[in-house]
């Protein structure tokens, strides 16, 4: 079982920055990718960014390209992993609950930004951007 805990959410004015962290512990070796997703009430959860564990390959939603950066600390390989989401130039439309997730995907086949492909989820952290 993979345990995920997010932190770093909060309130910021438009144009500001926030950095989210996701600590993944225990049995991380059973996964090969981690992602960030967001959801607002009444809408489907959408993929924001994803990163393959241990390598530098990343994926971004069009809405956040050039503004958000996903990165990882994989120094404790196969036992623990921390993934970050640096969010710059924030907009009011970025307001949402942000969730960290992890899974094992089929490389080149499964969509890394499709939430239905992810098995393990954190409880989320709220990001609010005011205009």
Image: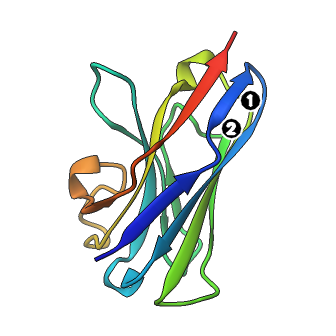
Q: How many marks?
A: 2
The one nearer the camera, 39 or 71, is 39
Which residue in the structure is indicated by mark 2? 67
14 vs 28: above or below? above
Which residue lies at the image location 25% right of the left edge and 72% below the top edge? 106
Q: Quadrant of the C terminus?
A: top right
Q: Residues within 10 Å of mark 2 (few under 14, many from 20)?
A: some
Is residue 101 toward the left or the right of residue 81 in the image? left
Residue 98 image position (x, y, % from top left): 47, 40
Residue 107 image position (x, y, % from top left): 31, 73
Which residue lies at the image location 32% right of the left edge and 36% below the top edge? 45
The one nearer the camera, 124 or 46, is 124
In primary-sequence order, the first of circles 1 and 2 is 2
Residue at the extreme top: 131
Which residue in the structure is indicated by mark 1? 89
Quadrant position of residue 124: top left
Quadrant position of residue 120: bottom left
């Amino acid at each position: 079982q993979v345990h995920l805990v997010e932190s770093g959410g909060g309130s910021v004015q438009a144009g500001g920055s926030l950095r989210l962290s996701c600590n993944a512990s225990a049995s991380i070796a059973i996964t090969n990718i981690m992602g960030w997703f967001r959801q607002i009430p009444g809408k489907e959860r959408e993929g924001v960014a994803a990163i393959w564990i241990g390598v530098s390959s990343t994926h971004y939603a069009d809405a956040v390209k050039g503004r958000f950066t996903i990165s990882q600390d994989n120094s404790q390989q196969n036992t623990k992993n921390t993934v970050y989401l640096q969010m710059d130039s924030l907009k009011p439309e970025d307001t949402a609950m942000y969730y960290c997730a992890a899974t094992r995907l089929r490389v080149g086949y499964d969509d890394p930004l499709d939430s239905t492909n992810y098995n393990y989820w954190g409880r989320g952290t709220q990001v609010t951007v005011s205009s």
